[in-house]
Image (cartoon, helix red, strand yellow):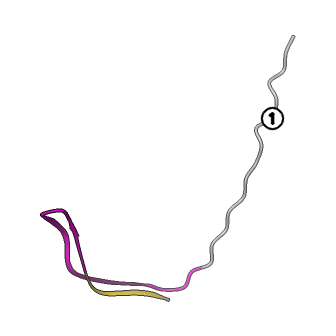
Amino acid sequence: MIQLKEVSKWYGAVQVLNNCSTSIKKAKWSWSAVRPAPANRR
């Protein structure tokens, strides 16, 4: 699990996050890379 609690962030004079909190539960991830088939050339 990933948790963020009371996160605040400033970029220069601009506050973009103000006491933000969230949690992400563990999940099963699946990823695959498939190469595209070559085009038929005639």
Q: Nearer the viewer, residue 19 or 9?
A: 9
Instruction: State the residue lying farthest toward the left.
Output: 13
Q: What residue do we see at 85% from left, 15% from top? A: 41
Q: Which amino acid type is shown beneath numbered disc 1?
A: Ala
| Picture layout, residue 30 above or below residue 4 | above
When asked about the image quadrant of residue 32, the answer is bottom right
- Total labels: the figure holds 1
Say few, some or many: other residues with alpha carbon within 10 Å of mark 1 (under 14 / 14 to 19 / 20 or more): few
When asked about the image quadrant of residue 37, the answer is top right
Mark 1, residue position: 37
Instruction: State the residue lying farthest toward the top.
Output: 42
The quarter of the image holding the C terminus is top right
Instruction: State the residue lying farthest toward the front.
Output: 12
**Circle 1 SS class:** loop
When asked about the image quadrant of residue 38, the answer is top right
Q: Position of residue 12 (x, y in %)?
A: 18, 62
Q: What residue do we see at 63% from left, 72% from top? A: 29
| Picture layout, residue 24 above or below residue 15 | below
Q: Nearer the viewer, residue 10 or 19?
A: 10
**Horizontal arrangement in the rendering, residue 2 relative to residue 6 (left or right):** right
Q: What residue do we see at 12% from left, 63% from top? A: 13
Q: Position of residue 20 (x, y in %)?
A: 24, 80
| Picture layout, residue 33 above or below residue 17 | above
Secondary structure mostly seen in magenta is strand
The magenta segment: 8-27
**Is residue 24 in the magenta section?**
yes
Q: Position of residue 15 (x, y in %)?
A: 16, 68
Q: Position of residue 2 (x, y in %)?
A: 46, 86
